[in-house]
Amino acid sequence: MNYISTRDKGVKVTAAQAIAQGISVEGGLFVPDTFPSFTKDDFHTIAGLDYKARAKYILKHFLNDFSQEEVEYCVNGAYTGSFDNEQPAPISLLGKNANILELWHGPTCAFKDLALQLLPYLLTTSAKKVNNGKKTVILVATSGDTGKAALEGFKDVPDTEILVFYPSEGVSPMQKLQMDSQKGGNVHVCAIKGNFDDAQTGVKKIFTDSQVKEKLAENNMLFSSANSINWGRLAPQIVYYVSAYCDLLGRDGDYLENGFNVVVPTGNFGNILAAYYAKKMGVPINKLICASNANNVLTDFINTGKYDRNRDFYTTISPSMDILISSNLERMLFELCGNNDKEVAALQAELSEKGTFEVSDRVKTALRELFWGGCCDDEATLETIGKYFGEYGYLCDTHTAVALNIYGQYIEATGDDRHTVIASTASPYKFAGSVLSAVSDKKAEGEFDTVRLLSSETKTEIPAPIKALENAAVRFNTVCEKQEMLGAVYSALGIK
Ligand SMILES: *Cc1c(COP(=O)(O)O)cnc(C)c1O
């Protein structure tokens, strides 16, 4: 297996190169040129393993130029001691069919930890192979959760510097505090006046600017990305969908004769894309259900085949999904277009020129075959939190609530209530104010009083990493204009 670019199949690199580089030179994203295909026997073998062994089994297929020892070193480093109960992705079954895949038991309480605890190991191992001793500079644009998870993963990792940009008005108070108080000698955090798309566009522009690249090279540095444009973010996410399937299999062998559906609260399309790849590898996923908040550009795309980012942008209570340019959709388009790099390059060019594109009828059909899309607003999100807490005593965060709401819409529209895995992407305590308002009339003043009240009202435990933030000192308070991002990068790196 090698990696090719979605915009130019002629570009062919190893896993280490793809991960160290982050994005291809012409702006395309790296994808494997072939996928492993797992048989029933493979899944039964995987089902008998613990999470780390499952990860090793699956990831070695994607890390073509890593030795077995390197794969083991990376996976052991990532998943030992960093997740509650050594179980990174437990499932809670609600009712008969709703399997909530809880992906927020890591150090920053969001699903991004599953990939970002591993990425620093993958990246430093890759950089040793391909970067000739250069320091790796990680640039991150975040809608809230990636930033903290990346900072936590990369803090004090030798030969790396990490710089995170977040929208100053676009993250929750807890997300902001998590980032602004980040410890570590190689970490930098900067808020920008703009939204997530501005941050992401700015970062992509800095990455692909050849003058900037030269300047870094003069200083013996090199960029890479911890955003889900980096393949090293996606591969670890495939693992938990395979793992979830194996857990369901273990519970009841014939449980899944008709396959199962997956619902994913979606922003940048990384998480749901990983589920698609798992399906491609043989996991019997029936429908991939794409859940959006009021920023419903993907719902419209799935339903009409027309992608149109020229619309109002909403700041919602599920901020990690406040995105109008879903960067990983490019990888999905590559799949849907039958690996036609020219077609993908043309669509992406249209998107960046006009903010919109429409796929061919063939692609529309393939898209609707695989996906079902739905969206809901903040009011429905809160109602859903209340409903699940009332019915099952299960407390979920705002993003997971969007997924559960769309899950309900899907069943109502189709009558298909087969077993379903719902990706639960964050702890409710990251969005305590919104979640509390959904389950109680009581209110508290400060963020941590709100957290404590949420805990006493719902009899649920405050995650340790959230508790620890209360007395954390704020280290970063820079806010810059979106045009000033490059300046912020140079200043963080001490480059003139
Ligand atoms: C990042 C994030 C999402 C969206 O995931 P994508 O991979 O960008 O689609 C959903 N929920 C939470 C809590 C997140 O942090």
Image (spheres, rainbow, N blue to C red):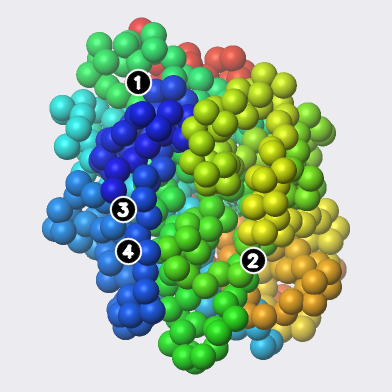
Q: Nearer the viewer, mark 3 or mark 1?
A: 3
- Asked if the residue at label 1 sits under 8 Å from ligand 1, the reply is no
Q: Which residue is mark 2?
A: 287
Marks 4 and 3 close (CB-CB < 8 Å): yes
Marks 4 and 2 close (CB-CB < 8 Å): no
Q: Position of residue 242 (x, y in %)?
A: 43, 69
Q: Secondary structure at mark 3?
A: loop
Q: Which residue is mark 3?
A: 62
Q: Nearer the viewer, mark 1 or mark 4?
A: 4
**Crowd tier of the residue under label 1, counting other residues whose Cα lies within 10 Å: few below 14, some 14–19, many 20 or above:** some
Residue type, numbered disc 4: Ile
Q: Earlier in the sequence, mark 2 or mark 3?
A: 3
Q: Secondary structure at mark 4?
A: helix
Give the CA separation, mark 4 to mark 2.
22 Å
Give the CA separation, mark 1 to mark 2.
45 Å
Instruction: Please tell me which residue is depicted at 27% across the width and 22% down the height of the picture.
Output: 221
Q: Position of residue 471 (x, y in %)?
A: 50, 52
Q: Which residue is mark 1?
A: 493
Q: Earlier in the sequence, mark 4 or mark 2?
A: 4
Q: Secondary structure at mark 1?
A: helix
Q: Quadrant of residue 440?
A: bottom right
The circle drawn on residue 339 is none
